[in-house]
Amino acid sequence: MTLMSLSKLSAPTPVPDTAPQMLDLSGLKCPLPALRTRKALKALASGARLSVICTDPMSAIDIPHLLRETGDALTGQHEADGKLTFDICKS
């Protein structure tokens, strides 16, 4: 490779941060977890990930229902120590 061809190489494309944003809604009751999740999703770019933590048992129904309405993907859901965690990918 000559010096001329080296100068034509472009800089590497930066890798986007793929760590999910955390949204802790512990202590909030229905309908606040779903409403705040909707608001957070509106602010995210397509492909961004969001982890939502809730303590309200109704969130197990409300959050998946919200995602069916918005078209965003529920990529994981689990419960531990009385907290529900929803892993979401923005469509």
Image (cartoon, rainbow, N blue to C red):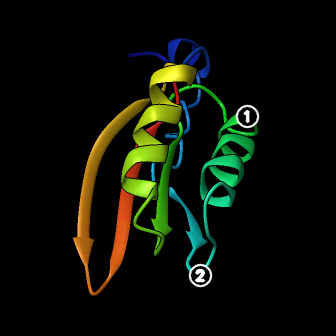
Q: Which of the numbered marks, if any, corresponds to residue 4?
A: none
Q: Is residue 70 above or below residue 57?
A: above
Q: Is residue 68 above or below residue 63?
A: above
Left or right: 89 with respect to 90? left
Q: Amino acid at mark 2?
A: Gly
Dot placed on the residue nearer the N-terminal end, 1 or 2: 2
Q: Amino acid at mark 1?
A: Lys
Give the image location of residue 15, x and y in percent. 49, 40
Q: Is residue 24 above or below residue 65?
A: below
Give the image location of residue 59, x and y in percent. 45, 56
Q: Which structural element holds mark 1? A: helix
Q: Is residue 62 above or below residue 2?
A: below
Quadrant for residue 82, please give it: bottom left
Give the image location of residue 44, x and y in percent. 68, 38
- Gap between marks 1 and 2 measured at Cα: 22 Å
User: Depth-wise, is mark 1 or mark 2 nearer the camera?
Assistant: 2
Name the residue that disc number 1 marks. 42
Quadrant for residue 27, please give it: bottom right
Give the residue drawn at x 40%, y 38%: 64
Q: Please state, as top left, top right, bottom left or bottom right, where the N terminus lies in the image.
A: top left
- CB under 8 Å between discs 1 and 2: no
Name the residue that disc number 2 marks. 27
Give the residue drawn at x 27%, y 53%: 77
Left or right: 91 with respect to 74? right
